[in-house]
Each structure stands twice: as C-alpha cells, then as structure tokens.
Amino acid sequence: MALTPRLDLRQTQSLVMTPQLQQAIKLLQFSSLELKDYVETQLEQNPLLEREERAESFDAAGDADRDARAVVGSDQDPPTVDAAVAQDGPAYADSDLDVDFYDNMYDGDSSGDSSWQSDPLGGGRWQARGGDFEDHDANPEDMLSSDISLQAHLASQLAVEIDDPVDRIIGVHLIDMLDEAGYLAGDLSQVAELLGCPVERVEVTLARLQRFDPPGLFARSLAECLALQLEDRDALDPSMQVLLEHLELVGRRDWPALSRQCGVTSDRLAEMLVELRSLNPKPALVFDRSVAQPVTPDIIMRAHPAGGWMIELNSETLPRVLVNSHYYSQVSRSVRNREEKQYVNECLQSANWLVKSLHQRATTILKVATEIVRQQQEFFVSGVHGLRPLVLRDIADAISMHESTVSRVTSNKFMSTPRGIYELKYFFTHAVGGGNGGGTHSAESVRHRIKKMIDAELPDAVLSDDALAEALQQEGIDVARRTVAKYREAMRIPSSVQRRRQKGELR
C-alpha cells in the first residue's frame, strides 16, 4: 500500500488554555494582597481601566447589598448564592457565565464589547454598610502605647552609669551588637580593633553593661544569660553554677546524673530547677513592640437574626475597577493605523475580561464558603469536636464545580467566624473510622480529644499511647496506637515516659 498525501476533514474537541482562562485561574488562587498588587499593575498598564471611587451613598447601595449575601441554616427561605448574584447584577451575570466558569471557559471574541462597564460585584453590592463595620481610617499602630525601644532604654542607662567618653563609645557599639533576644552577636576583638583600644577595656565595659536592666542582657551564651539573672537575684551559689554548666542534662531530664554533678538532694534539685524555669532565656523580648500584621479575612460570617448563619465577602479586600467606555470611544475615533486599532481593542478586551474575572472570582469564593459553612455547622455550634470529615470532592460535588477549582478557592483565603479567623483549608480533614457503627470522625477532632485527655491526666496515671487508643475506642473512635502516636508527635506532646518524669519526679 503506497503512502500518499491527502486532505481529511475531522471534527474534534479539546480544552484550550486561553489567555483569558489562565487569567481567571490565576485570579482565583490569588490571596487578597496578591490580587491587590495584580490589579494595581493592570491599572498602570491598561489605559481603559480605572479605579471605581467609593463615593456612592450607602443608602443607594443598600438594597443591592442585601441581596449579595448567603444565609445558611435559617428557618426562612434565604436567597441562594446563584440567586444573590443574578439579582440586580451586571449584564454578564446570566447564562453566558457557566456554573463552573474555570473548567468550561472557551476561547471567545469579546473585542469591541463594552457591556462589562460595571463593578466586579455588581454596582457596589458588596460595599460595607454603615452599621456593620466602623467606617474610619484609624491605624491600629497609632493606638499603641509609646513604649521606648530596648536601644533607647539601654542608651538612657549608659548616659547615667558611664561617664568616660571612650567607655560610652564602646557601650554604644556593644548595644548595636545585640540581637533580638538580647545576646551579644559578634567578637569583642572586632570592637577593640575598630575603636583602637585594648580588648581588656572592652571586656570591662561589657561587664558594666551586663549589670543593666533587664538582667541577662549582653550575654554570649544561654548559661551566661541565666547566670547574670541569678546573680542579680543573689541566687548564684556553687551548686547553681554547676547546674548551669550541665544544661545538657536538664535537656535530657537526667535528674539522677544532675543531682550527682551538683552534689545536692533530689528535693534541692527540684527547687533549683524551679528557680531556673523562672528565668527569662530571651530578656530582650520584653521590649519587643513590633506590630503583628493581622490577617484580613476574605469572608465574614455572623449569626443571622432569624437563625443560621449569614456569609458575605469582605468588601475591603475586593478591588473595584471599571472599563472607561467613554475614553474608549474617543480613542477609537482617533486611531490612525491598524496597529493602534489592534492595541486599543486588546486593551478593551483585557479590561473586560479582568472585570468579568473579578466578578466570577467573588461569586465562586462566596459559593464555596457558603457550602463549607453548611457542611461544618456543628463546628460553629459546639466547637472543634464537632468538626466533621470533609474533602474537596464533597464541596465540589455539592456546588457542581471541579475539585481543582475548590482547591484554588480555599488556598490563602480566610474566613472570620464567631470562633475566630480560620483559613478555608482548616475545615478540610480526612476521616478517622468510628467503632461499633459510630460513623466517622475528623482527624482534627481526634487530635483535639487526645490533647484534652493528656491535659487531664494525673501525675500517677499518665496515659500511654495504647491507653489513649483504648479510651478513644470506648468513645466510638476506631484509631490505632501508631495513629495516636503520630497525632501526639504532630502536636509536640512528649511521650508518656517523658510526661511521667515531668509530672512525677519533681512533685
């Protein structure tokens, strides 16, 4: 049979990763900070995009805002997420947005289409209402007390305690060499070489600085830090000095060997260890006034007056952009060649897709969060022991989306609940079998139960991993001893032998 070239007409189907689809997927998995940076970049690059000013009246946006939330577990008939998006929404909130936008998007031509001139959330529907959040620009850092820093505290003592100008200069350099825990990071010979003075004079100045408040600063090791604090308390006797020289035995909890090294009885050793534990191994941290950056939740959940829960997106984390159709019409009339026209059309298409993708991202996040709350209602009512096993497939099947879409939604997204702020990934945990037909339990609830049992154990009745497994089986949780050990180690809880030493030998 001879091979000859020929033309065939074939019809096939394939999923094409269009630039628009890639953009939508990327936006979906962005955190709120990453999304903000991305939108700022697009605003700089695309002349047809503009930021929507939030100067609208709350009264004008109130009706639309009330439709843009989901209610879970209420006796009344709440609007579904799909209905909430469709009501009073923009022109594109209809059939041209498939239920799973990210799995079924195709390569379409939207050039010249100026219908996407709207807020990604439908004309301010998600704006915070005046009675729900405090509408002010107060900076939490401005409300902090004006406590002095460690360097300023030490500099004030240096000015009082040391008169010699050379020693003061040495002291300033030593203060700058402190690390965040208060230890001296660096070699004294380097300071002596830099300032052109003997090392002995630097050591004398260091000894004076080590008497500054708080005790324990300017130490070069943990033993020296603890010794400085004990010396300040007038408690550094010879036996305590020996104890500081054998801190590795304290770490191993080898009390008999430590008692022999110190030459003291077990009762005296217990008193020395209590004294040791009262010391601060990082004395500079009492001056740590750095402001912890709070997590900004993407979803806000609160109790509904009629019962159940109300879930809505946090408007402060949602960027608002518009397509300036008026500017597009002006520019379109003044284009002079094909390249300029192509550039303007590409900018319009990109802007339309960005607005559309932002809207779909908000809709999808709300839909996934609503289903998570619906399936984990027992957790919000009774606590962590009510957390039920949940995997991505359960949410994906319930809202008719792909697992990969749910995975992207739940990454780096946080929800504010009456029990605290949680990442959406927290609510997904695999199942642990229940004994005697007792159903299944989430791994997180089992870990919580193990920790609660260990915290309640008595010094003379420390539970081994086998005993913990038997106690869980009596409660209907079928779990093996090695699983208990794995959960205990993940929570950094010592073994039963170590716990028995902690609770029994030092009573």
Image: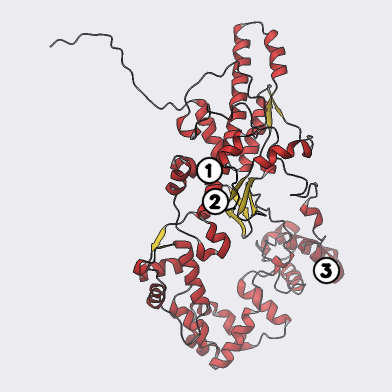
Element on which disc 1 rests: helix
Q: Earlier in the sequence, mark 2 or mark 3?
A: 3
Q: Quadrant of the N terminus?
A: top left
Q: Residue at x 72, y 67 (%)?
A: 286
Q: Residue 464's spot in the image, x, y percent?
A: 41, 78
Residue 421 in sight here = yes
Circles 2 and 3 in contact, beta carbons < 8 Å: no
Q: Which residue is mark 1?
A: 409
The residue identified by callout 2 is 424
Single out the mark in the foreground, 2 or 3.
2
307 sits left or right of 203 in the view: left
Q: Position of residue 137 (x, y in %)?
A: 80, 46
Residue at image position (50%, 68%) is: 448
Real-space CA distance between mark 2 and mark 3, rounded to the nearest whole angstrom: 49 Å
Q: Position of residue 240 (x, y in %)?
A: 61, 85
User: Circles 1 and 3: CB distance less than 8 Å?
Assistant: no
Q: Quadrant of residue 380?
A: bottom right
The residue tagged 3 is 157
Crowding at dot 2, Cα within 10 Å, few <14 / some 14-19 / many 20+, comes out as many
Q: Quadrant of the C terminus?
A: bottom right
Disc 1 marks which amino acid?
Val
Q: Position of residue 461 (x, y in %)?
A: 46, 85
Query: In the orientation shown, which residue stands out farthest toward the left?
Result: 1
Numbered disc 2: secondary structure: helix
Q: CA distance from mark 1 to mark 3?
A: 54 Å
Between discs 1 and 3, the one toward the N terminus? 3
Query: Quarter-wise, where is residue 355 in the image?
Result: top right
